[in-house]
Image (cartoon, rainbow, N blue to C red):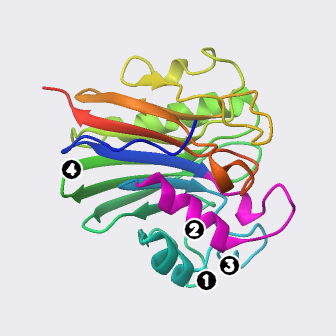
Amino acid sequence: MPSPPSKSPGDIRVASYNLHKCVGLDRRRDPHRVARVLAGLSADVIAVQEIDRRLPPRPTALPRAVLEEEAGLAPAPVAETTVSLGWHGNGLLLARGWRMDDLHRLPLPGLEPRGALIADLSGPSGQLRVVATHLGLRRRDRQRQMTQIMAALNLSKEAPTVLLGDLNEWAPHAGFAPLDPYFELHNPGRSFPARRPMAALDRVATGPGLKVRQMGTCRAGEAGRASDHLPIWADLCVDG
């Protein structure tokens, strides 16, 4: 799909993008290219995965100055170090006027270290709780991780909630039982691998009170080669 269309006034555009540490299909690390793709999404809130490099101290692969000056986005303060922009590789990027009011960093069980960010945000279109995550490679790990996320949300006050991320599930529908019945799962389209998308690894899930007006993947221009994943997006409105 080409770049996302204009969104309706009052809607909140969310997106998710596995940056692959800013390494594209040409094996070049190019944060400027990634910044241009992010800018083209015209999103209010973007959950990103693999924003930091793998080895400690895990410096960011997408410099703050590049992100702010070339994409017009600000990283939410989720990192625990001065060199990273994410936590367990997960980051939240916010458009002008949006801010983070509260944050819960949730470690997730599994074969390899994983985590989820549960952030309460507010902006021009209202308030939104975002769960940003990158789930594990094994289904049994993903099941435990989703169960942990739901347990944490059950302890929180009610808020319009969207879950975004690379959920690493190749099956179109199976594997998401822990999210039922609270979340409704949406499939914006096949997003991996970027060169020839075969699987919808990147997903959006909405909680009660949120409705998806339109959604999709973005393969236009540099989005088709800036990472091994395509970005996904969705326009949300408060239902009723």
Q: Which residue is mark 4?
A: 127
Question: Could you tell me which quadrant the N terminus lies in?
Answer: top right
Q: Earlier in the sequence, mark 4 or mark 3?
A: 3
**Kind of residue sitting beneath label 3:** Pro
Q: Which residue is mark 3?
A: 59
Q: Determine crowd level at label 1: few under 14, some 14-19, many 20+ residues with C-alpha closer than 10 A.
A: some
- The first of marks 2 and 4 along the sequence is 2
Nearest to the observer: residue 128 or residue 45: 45
Label 3 packing within 10 angstroms: few (<14), some (14-19), many (20+): some
Please state the horizontal and vertical placement of residue 196, each as a whole percent of the image. Answer: 80, 34
User: Along the polypeptide, which appears first: circle 1 or circle 2?
Assistant: 2
Q: In whole angstroms, how far apart are the C-alphas of marks 3 and 2? A: 17 Å
Can residue 61 be seen here? The reply is: no
Secondary structure found at label 2: helix
Q: Are marks 3 and 2 in contact (CB under 8 Å)?
A: no
Q: Nearer the viewer, mark 1 or mark 2?
A: 2
User: Image point 74% across, 32% down: which residue?
Assistant: 197
Image coordinates for residue 134, horizontal then vertical, percent: 61, 46
Left or right, 48 with reference to 194: left
Foreground: disc 3 or disc 2: 2
What's the magenta region? Answer: 18-42
Q: Earlier in the sequence, mark 1 or mark 4?
A: 1
Return the residue at label 2: 35
Q: Which mark is residue 83?
A: 1
